[in-house]
Image (tube, grey):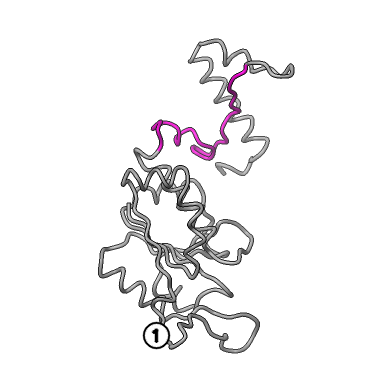
Amino acid sequence: MQIDILTLFPQIFDGPFSQSIVKRAVEKQLVNIDLHNIRDFSLSKHKNVDDYPFGGGAGMVMSVEPIDLCLQSLHTLRSYDEVIYLSPDGELFDQKIANQLSGKANLIFLCGHYKGVDERVRENLVTRELSLGDFVLSGGELAAAAMVDAIIRLIPGVLGDECSALSDSFQDDLISPPVYTRPAEYKGWKVPDILLSGHQAKIDEWRHEQSLERTAKRRPDLGK
């Protein structure tokens, strides 16, 4: 998979992408992530990428030209399945979308900043808009990092256990059951006997029942 991220602050990704699952996926050459500084495509003397909004109002707006030029340069390299803009009012990102995007070959993530991007970017240059939730971040970088992590861990070969991602919360609209590890008892707190029984069919049944119970209690909205 090829992932290209357009941003004004590429250094933000140094931490999330240099650790853990994403790092291993890159090292295994299962995914390639390229960061593109939008300022590099500004034609102004001072590399400006934003301006005051027409009609007045507080804040600055990211200009259409450098974003367009950056996207044009990428489109000469390959065809992209999606050009995704991270926006608070976009489609709410969830596990189903992560599953869907994990099967794509080439993705672009555009990180907004300030008061957002010129509306002409949204109207003409992106194919999809995604949101991490009903709140506003300083920019799209943290949302992009979270989404990329959720997508990459679903790519076959990334996780050591191929079944691990399939048992994650929100797969099949269920929350994961509780999990335990050694010791079997700590401060009088005991692991459920069923998990120590060695009877896999009954363990699987217990886990499914726990998932159903937890989902009904904590996220009754799932699956509706």
Q: Which residues are magenta?
A: 159-183
Q: Is residue 25 above or below residue 50?
A: above
Query: Which residue is painted at 38% across and 48% down in the image?
Result: 102
Q: Is residue 67 left or right of residue 91?
A: left
> Residue 44, located in which quarter of the rendered image?
bottom left
Is 156 left, or right, of 203 in this rendering? left
* Furthest-right residue in this view: 188
Percent from the top left, x then y, of residue 69? 35, 77
Mark 1 belongs to which amino acid?
A: Leu
* 108 relative to 212, above or below: below
Vertical side of 211 occupied by 148: above or below: below
- Any magenta on residue 210? no
Q: Mark 1 falls on what kind of element?
A: loop
Residue 216 is situated, as x and y percent measured from the top left of the image, at: 64, 35
**Residue 21 image offset from top left, x and y in percent:** 44, 43
The vertical placement of 64 against 175, above or below, is below
Q: Is residue 168 magenta?
A: yes
Residue at image position (29%, 69%) is 75
Count of labels shown? 1
Q: Residues within 10 Å of mark 1 (few under 14, many from 20)?
A: few
Q: Residue at x 46, y 68 (%)?
A: 7
Quarter of the image where the C terminus is located = top right
- Is the stretch drawn in magenta largely helix, strand or loop? loop
The picture places residue 115, in percent across and down from the top left corner, at 58, 75
The residue singled out by tag 1 in the image is: 43
The residue located at (48%, 15%) in the rendering is: 201
